[in-house]
Amino acid sequence: MINRKRFLQLGLLSGVTSLLLKNGRGQVVTQNGPVVISTWDAGLAANKGAWDILSRGGTALDAVENGVKITEASQNCCVGLGANPDREGIVTLDASIMDHQFNCGSVGFLERIKHPISVARRVMEKTPHVMLVGSGAQQFAVEEGFPLEPQVLSADAQNAYKKWLEHSKYEPAINRENKGHGPFAPQRFDNGEWNHDTIGMLAMDAKGNLSGSCTTSGMGFKMRGRLGDSPIIGAGLFVDNEVGACVATGQGEDVIRVAGSHSVVEMMRQGYGPEVACRKIIERIVKIKKADAQKIQVAFIAINKNGIVGSYAIHKGFNYAIKTKIKETLVDSNYHFTS
Ligand code: ASP
């Protein structure tokens, strides 16, 4: 017989029961109809872009592209051409997209293009490949009609880079909370650092199909040429329409080494609910990193085929945004280190 704990782990709750059992952080959500979730508080605005599509009966694929484009275009946030540069002072962008039929596309190390997510989608739809990087990705984007933006840093990024050059130490900060700047405020702190740099989005449309997207400037002050997890299908993003979908944020290197998003989906395939599936892979990373796990942040958000969503992070401070017909809110994620 399945006991209550196992029942919860398997995510077999009915909608009504799940509402009753919610732990105050909204980790168990069941609903009917479209749903979109995305990482961090910038996800609130991005979800609106996705909802424009979903609420009109559009596809999850269109929704996840449209949603994260809002974040890419916002020059004051954590993604896109306004974000922190690499250590040579150049902004390089990574993005990936995946639909309900294992179609996927991504770009990495892309410069001067405002909407890398749309280039990733073109890679998926118009090339025989999954991934284009660097000058090749840029050349493809230009051929596809994407304008080449000027190579300039935003004023904030310029400031941050100047401050970073004073010490030139690569020490990605664990995300800190928003210091009361309000949900749409830039996440750049007084010392010039961003606290995180990715928006990942997962959507289920009215037909029950899943898609996901992920777009980022990567870790600020990274080495030139560095790719993170975000453009790597299976690491930063994975969608299996029969099972569920997952997207990652945080220290990309540690997401890549456990094929993070794919591993979370495989946990859901084994029957675990989204939050437990995310927790299991976070625990795997913590075990691998040993004491160093204290210094890094990784978080996953996931959705299963029944529209149940969940997340888990290494440290406190990660949140994600959810939007459904009846709900539009930020959810504080559960996390591993409680002290
Ligand atoms: N995962 C991203 C990367 O490693 C960064 C982030 O999510 O903050 O490039």
Image: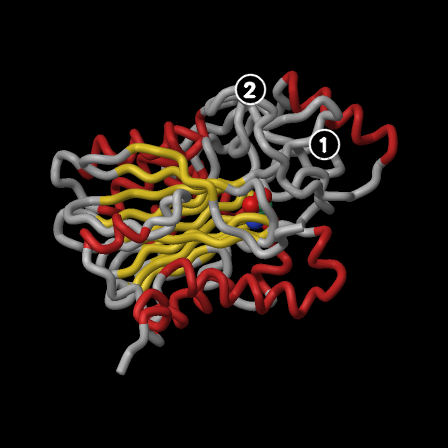
Q: Which quarter of the picture shows residue 81?
A: top right
Q: Residue 230 appears at what percent x and percent y?
A: 51, 51
303 sits left or right of 223 in the view: left
- Report if the CB atoms under discs 2 and 1 are less than 8 Å apart: no
Report crowding for label 1: few under 14, some 14 to 19, many 20 or more residues within 10 A (C-alpha). Answer: some
Image quarter where the N terminus lies is: bottom left
Task: Answer whether residue 65 is visible to the viewer in this image.
Answer: yes
The image shows residue 236 at horizontal and vertical percentages of 49, 55
What is the basis of the colouring in this image?
secondary structure
Specify the amino acid type for callout 2: His
* Residue 165 relative to residue 203: left or right: right
Q: Is residue 145 visible?
A: no
- Amino acid of disc 1: Gly
Q: CA distance from mark 2 to mark 1?
A: 27 Å
Label 2: which secondary element: loop
Residue position for label 1: 89
Q: Residue at x 55, y 19 (%)?
A: 181
Which residue is outermost to the top?
A: 155
Q: Which mark is residue 124?
A: none
Which badge, 2 or 1, is on the more N-terminal residue?
1
Asked if residue 63 is positioned above or below residue 296 in the image, the reply reads above
Using the rendered view, name the quadrant where residue 38 is placed: top left
* Within-10-Å neighbours for mark 2: few <14, some 14–19, many 20+: few
